[in-house]
């Protein structure tokens, strides 16, 4: 189930310069959803001044994600090193430890292949998690980048991520609201079908499979 939660925070990604994302995911304790979001917003206010851009989002199952976006792994490492020296972060940690709101259930490290275009509160994203079978990760990413303009012409905003630990790819289609998301799903796309057919290899597959699919909602700042 970790993969289901891993990309929730990417819904709020709005920093085009960011090339990497570290996502921590949380399951609220009973009755603590509002406190979980409140804590995340407090943490965001601290982290936004320390060299990363923070994004918060929810999954339709009620879990939450907190993404820290940086222009490089080095920049993220410098941020991580600075945390123990932050008096504001130390005070916040003491506060949330004394009155916890959620349990951390996952962590993921993503390289941003095709940057997202941002989103506003209430926007919706459909995320597909791909894993290679007979093909290579480079082939999978190239296939995703080829699909991107087709889906964007049909009304989706597309971004692509590579999980650098689990060697998976995340393909995210974003929409301004649920109605736009639904219209996209209802509308046949013969151009995309033909494109997928062109990627078929001799064994009748694309060299990769979808291992998860989920829908997220932008929580807002």
Image (cartoon, rainbow, N blue to C red):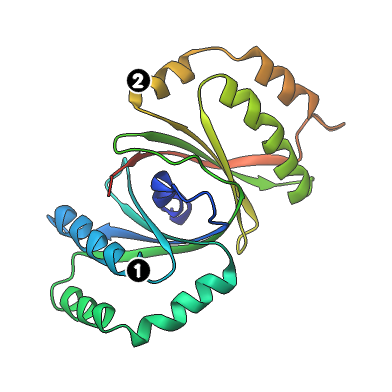
**Left of 170 or right of it: where is 3?**
left
Residue 58 at what x, y percent from top left? Answer: 31, 47
Task: Please provide percent x and percent y for residue 64.
Answer: 31, 53
- Earlier in the chain: of badge 1 and badge 2, it is 1
Q: Could you say where residue 55 lies in the image, as x and y percent from the top left?
A: 37, 54
Residue pictured at 53% horizontal, 56% vertical = 18
Q: Nearer the viewer, residue 86 or 184?
A: 86
- The location of residue 139, given as percent across then percent down, is 78, 44
- Tell me which residue sits at (39%, 46%) in the image: 12
- Residue in view at x 52 percent, y 76 percent: 77
Tag count in the figure?
Answer: 2
On screen, residue 178 above or below 112: above
Side of 182 relative to 189 (left or right):
left
Q: Give the quadrant of residue 106.
A: bottom left
- CA separation in Å, label 1 and label 2: 35 Å
Q: Which mark is residue 49?
A: 1
Residue density around tag 2, few if under 14, some if 14–19, many if 20 or more, within 10 Å: few
What residue occupies the far right of the structure in this picture?
202
SS type, badge 2: helix
Q: Give the vertical position of 76 relative to 116 (above or below).
A: below
In depth, the one of 71 and 130 nearer the eye is 71
Q: Residues within 10 Å of mark 1 (few under 14, many from 20)?
A: few
Q: Nearer the viewer, mark 1 or mark 2?
A: 1
- Disc 2: which residue: 179
Residue at screen point 58% across, 69% down: 73
Residue extending furthest toward the bottom: 85
Q: Quadrant of residue 47?
A: bottom left
């Amino acid at each position: 189930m970790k993969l289901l939660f891993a990309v929730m925070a990417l819904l709020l990604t709005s920093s085009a310069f960011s090339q990497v994302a570290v996502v921590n995911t949380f399951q609220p304790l009973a009755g603590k959803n509002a406190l979980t979001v409140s804590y995340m917003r407090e943490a965001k206010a601290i982290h936004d001044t320390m060299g990363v851009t923070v994004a918060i989002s929810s999954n339709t199952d009620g879990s939450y994600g907190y993404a820290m976006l940086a222009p490089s792994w080095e920049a993220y490492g410098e941020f991580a090193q600075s945390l123990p020296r932050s008096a504001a972060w130390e005070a916040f940690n003491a506060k949330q430890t004394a009155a916890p709101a959620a349990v951390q259930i996952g962590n993921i490290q993503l390289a941003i292949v095709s940057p997202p275009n941002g989103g506003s509160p209430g926007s919706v994203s459909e995320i597909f998690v791909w894993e290679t079978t007979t093909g290579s990760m480079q082939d999978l990413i190239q296939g995703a980048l080829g699909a991107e303009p087709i889906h964007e012409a049909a009304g989706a905003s597309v971004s692509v991520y590579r999980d650098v630990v689990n060697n998976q790819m995340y393909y995210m289609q974003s929409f301004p609201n649920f109605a736009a998301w639904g219209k996209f799903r209802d509308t046949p796309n013969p151009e995309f079908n033909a494109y997928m057919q062109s990627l078929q290899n001799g064994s009748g597959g694309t060299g990769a499979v979808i291992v998860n699919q989920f829908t997220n909602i932008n929580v807002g700042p």
